Structures are given as structure tokens and as C-alpha cells.
Image (cartoon, coloured by chain):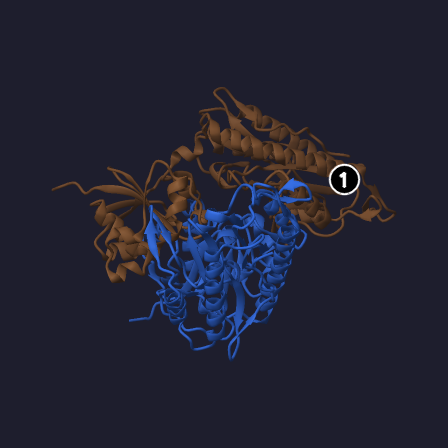
Chain colours: A blue, B brown
Amino acid sequence: MKKLRTAILLADIPEKNADLRYVCGFSAPDPVVVLLGPARRLLIVNSMEAGRARQTVCDMTVLTPEELALSAQEKGRFSGWILGALRLEKCRRVLVGGSFALGIARHLEAAGIQVEVSEKPLFPEREVKNTQEIRALQAVQEATVAAMRRAVAIIRASVPDKKGFLKSKGKALTAEGLRADMRKFLLDRNCTAPELIIACGAQGADPHQAGTGPLRARESIVLDFFPRNMTTGYWGDLTRTVVKGKASRELAAMECAVRETQKAVLRAVKPGVNGADLHKMAIRMFEERGFKNAMKNGAAEGFIHGTGHGVGLEIHERPALALQDVVLQPGNVITVEPGLYYRSIGAIRIEDTVRVTQSGCECLAACPPVFEV
Amino acid sequence: MKKLRTAILLADIPEKNADLRYVCGFSAPDPVVVLLGPARRLLIVNSMEAGRARQTVCDMTVLTPEELALSAQEKGRFSGWILGALRLEKCRRVLVGGSFALGIARHLEAAGIQVEVSEKPLFPEREVKNTQEIRALQAVQEATVAAMRRAVAIIRASVPDKKGFLKSKGKALTAEGLRADMRKFLLDRNCTAPELIIACGAQGADPHQAGTGPLRARESIVLDFFPRNMTTGYWGDLTRTVVKGKASRELAAMECAVRETQKAVLRAVKPGVNGADLHKMAIRMFEERGFKNAMKNGAAEGFIHGTGHGVGLEIHERPALALQDVVLQPGNVITVEPGLYYRSIGAIRIEDTVRVTQSGCECLAACPPVFEV
């Protein structure tokens, strides 16, 4: 039996699909097809995008649906483009990623194409950043650090009123106001940051709560900044937790545990280490210090998320430092971000983004430790 | 034979999936599951998000994987959450959208679940905007119009140097500079706009080319602004094309044809009309005026895109005014944006976003016509 020719197939909107952007470097708000066959690498875009695609993409053959000899029925359907491209490349079998659209897969299967889902990531090389990617990640992380320094300086310079609400230059300092300032600051550095966490007190106990309203003295203020460079598409990620004035004994104990845990994990990051072991180490350290996980009124408390995640063209990507086994490699870029969350006390999270080196790890952009300001 | 209980299933990252955001109003950077069964509406989020989800979502039951009695194998897999939820709801058959992840579908099928792909959109009601959505769309479109007025005023106030490069307050006026100004202006109105097209001369002939470098007198400058409100998630969309100084005879003829075509299509928009007929009408009007479509050096020229598209939680959504049949309904929000593109002359596009009313259509936010400035 003749072996079927297999090609890797991607079919999606590049702006939403990091694999597509990674493999062809072309971004568009409308669907495109990439077919990586044994003979050549095809990029199919609508005719309107053809000129721009040919200018942008150097190592692929750019075609439009008009060049695929499509039937009338195929022309009107995105899956028709794929069938035309497969016919052209004499491919009857495609390998796709797990997020490939089921509707398209069913159309291809109905036309006799074998659609195989890759159990592993389609582009495991995305997890190992090359020099150019490291530079892009460093640049956005440096902007993130600069924003963090500014935010901390603003909180440090603020003054609590009699009720403990922080005032900055005579005006109420709110999560919204500080967020707007940060967004502008990051925009000046070519970064977009639709989401920025500035969460005071109990708000911080929901780790993805953006935070609203006035910032208050003597409460934890979680500052989690994750902007994206608008040109390169790479993300930064950095968290500091500050308290204006003196922290309560409980908050100070949490901060100490989180700081020590982060340090210990950072010291342990190196090639060959299992991400799950790092996560379990963080869990164990918190338990040893008496910080327990529990559900309270339907919400989780304690150390309630993973210890870290990969950062690249997606803000959360592989490899994760969580319950699943994953062996770290040189060139991985990951966050290390233990945290503790108790609604009645507050939240502490400390996060840095590091590059795994040959022998350990290195911060992408150094941000000084800070707590009481 | 007992009829299988069917539920609508969504399983994705809400920030990337407009259907998910539409149906549960909850946004998160990590995957969630929505199961709309005959008995109840379930939202499954990881335990870290449970508190925030319960605060945000009022008409759904929020559960965490821990509440689903999962096997050890199911716990570590996102598809395991879905299997647990289906068991709980006694569902053996699910209806999903065409973009549902193939990898998850295969896992469900391996566990004996029937996965049916909806031929139609899962939530056709997304195409008919309710009062609250219209308000959100108007608000973001008003911010878009304000930005456009400002951009046009800046170009109008600019002065060409001897080579025809525009100077604004003594400094070179570039696509990048004007874009940065627009982004800040929109940020002050709670809108993000990572992409803003400011494309001068031949650059405009690629309709999705963002544009770079100095802006020049007597050339077409396509200004296509599509910001997104960061709170509501709804998009605005507006295009004007301006020329600083006097346009060439060819550009002026193109502008006249585009303006008349847009007017004619806007007059024809009403419930019951087929979007494809509107698109064909635009094509015909351009042909009658002598504007032909052709491929030139691998790039399409002429009227090379659809006449319009729906706007909502996605910048391009249904219904489209393109080759596919689609009957307009009151409450549709669509763009009407004919354009002409010739590399050697330049580009003209005029776009407004309108709401289909009972008897015609109404601009979401009025922006005056403009051409030579």
C-alpha cells in the first residue's frame, strides 16, 4: 500500500492562533490556511491579503483560493480552500493540533481526508525560545518592570487619609486611576495591556480579579502586570505585592512565606527538573509554614494556582509548573509565582519571568523586591 | 429507544471565544466549560476562579472540577472536566459550534459521547443586538468617531514641506506618530486599539496593511479605526479616506464612486434584504463606473473585499455583506464599507457602522463625510 502523504495543517485566524503566528509570522483578522507538506510550505490567504502576505512571509509559497482550482461549492467555504490545497499537494492525510476546528475536520473527513490530532504540541520548539524571541521577551519584560517601578513609586508617595484611603497628589488613588496611568505608560513603550491586576485587600484573593475602587493603607495591593508588545506579539509578566504602611502580622507572615518559596523555586529551576516537582515543592513549603488550602464560602483559599507557566506569544503557554509532569529545558521562559490567598487577610503573590539557562535560570529583567512602602 | 439528553457545550478560553463571553458574561484567560442542558446551565471554572465567577454570573450554576467527582485521570485533563459535567447532567450527546476543539471532541467520543456540530451558529441571537448591546456599540462607535475627527483635524492642520511630506507643529507627521496619538486618545475613552490602519498612497492598496512612515500630500490616506471597549468587549469600526490638498483626477473619480456606492448600499439596507444582493449591487456600481478587478503582480486590485460585516463582540462577525446569502434583520449591526484599491493610484474606503432598523438603517454614530482637507 502506498504511504499517504502527510502534511501539518493549520486553519484559523492568525490573530487568535499563536501557532499560526509562530509558523508564518503573518497576522490577519481573517482565516488563513497553512499546509506544511513534504514538498513545500503553503500559506493560503484571501486575494485581498495576498500582496501583504507575499511581502511579509519569506519562506512559504503564498497562494489565494483563486489559484487552487476550486469547485463552486468549495469557493464559498473555508474548508473548500483546504481541500483545494490538499489536492494540489497530493495530501490525503493531515496532522492537526488539538484546538483544530471540529467543523472543518468533519468537512475534510467527509471528503475522504484522514485527520489525525497530534497528542503532543504541533510546534514543541515554541517552548524553547531562540535568541530573537529572548530579545523580544526581554524588551517587553523591561517595559513591565519600568511600569512596576512607577506603580510602586506612586503608592509609596501616596498619603493615607484618616479612613486609610490613599491620596496621590491630593486625589483619591484608585485601582482604575492607577491602571489608566499604567496603560498609558506601557502604550508609550509600544505595549498593550487591556488587563492589569491592581487588587487591594480581599479583592486580591481572587487571583484574576482586576480590582476596582480606592486603594487602602495597611492592606495588600497585588500588582500583576502582563502587557503585550504590539509589534512582536510577545508578553511580559510580573507581580509584586505591596502594603502602604505597616502590614499586619498575618500579612507579613504570608509575604515571608511567599518570598522564601519563590526564592527556593528560583534556585531549583534548571534543565532536567520536572515542573511538577517544583510545584509540589512550593505546596510543601507553604504547608510546612502552616498555610493550608481550603474551600470557604464556595471559594478556594491558600495556595490555589500553579507555581508558574510558560510565556511567549501566549501569556499562558507550555511548559507549566503545575501538577502535570514536564521536564524543563534551556530556553524555556517561565514565570515563578507562588501566592497565598485568604479573603479575611488579603493576598500575596510574587512573580518573576525567567529564562532557563544551561545551569539554572536568569531573570529576564530584574525588578527589586518590595513589600511595605 | 430512550431519547438521549442533548446539551449545548462550549469549552474554551473566554477571552478568545466570543460565544462563551456572550453566553456567560464571564471573562478569563484560562479554559472554562459551559454546558446548557435541559435542566440547568452549568459553568465549570477552576477553583481559583470560582469566587469571581459566582460574583459575575447570575443565571448559571458555577461548579469547580473538585465538585464533579472526577477520576484521577479526568482531573488532570480539561476534557475530564467535561466528562464529569456530562455525567452529572446525565447527558450523552452534545451540540457544539464549528470551532469546537477537535482534540477535545475525540476524547469525548472515545468516552461514548455523541458530538454533533451545529451547521448554524450556536447563538444566532448574537446577530440581533438587544438594547444594552446597541448602547455598548454606540458608545464605542462614538469614541471611534471622536478619534477620527481628531485624526482628520491633525491632517487638515498639517503643512506639506517642499517634498510633499506633511509636517504637524513643525514635526514630520507619520503613520506611527498619528497611530500613537490615536491609541492614547482612545485609551482615555476606555478603548484598546492595538491595530489602527493609517495607510498612505500605495500602502492603502493592501486593505489590512497598518501603514508606516511619513504621510504625504496629494496621496490617499486611509484611516480605518476599530477600537474595542475594554469593559464591554464591543468593537467600533469606521473608515475615512482623506487627501491633504488636491486629489488627482483618478483618486477623485475613485472617491466619488466609493461615496456614491456607499450611499446607495446604505439606502438599500433594510430587513428582508439579502446581504449578497447588496454586495452584488456594490460590485455592479463599480463596474458600471469603469472600475475593474484584476490581479497585478500577484496582488488583487479593484473592489477586492466584501461590502460589509457584522460587528459585536467580534470585529468581524455575522451577518456579512458578501457572496453568501444572508437575510438582514432588525437589530443587525453591520458595516457598509465599499472601497477601491489600485497600487499605482492609491486607495479609497469609506465605512460606517449601522444598525438595521424596522424600515432601513441608522448610523450608530454620525461621522461627517470628508475627503480633501
Left or right of A362? Residue B201 is right
Which quadrant: the N terminus of chain B? top left
Q: Is residue B344 visible?
A: no
- Give the residue drawn at x 45%, y 62%: A338
Residue furthest to the top in view is B359
Left or right of B29? Residue A164 is right
The amino acid type, in three-letter code, at marker 1 is: Ile
Q: Is residue A189 visible?
A: yes
Which quadrant: the C terminus of chain B? top right
- Give the residue drawn at x 53%, y 33%: B137
Residue position marked by numbered label 1 in the rendering? B155
- Give the residue drawn at x 70%, y 44%: B181
Q: Give A233 or A219, whichever is nearer the viewer.
A: A219
Residue furthest to the bottom in view is A359
| Res. B184 image quadrant | top right
The x, y position of residue B28, in whole percent, is 44, 49
Q: Is residue B35 above or below residue A111?
A: above
Residue furthest to the left in view is B1
Element type at mark 1: helix
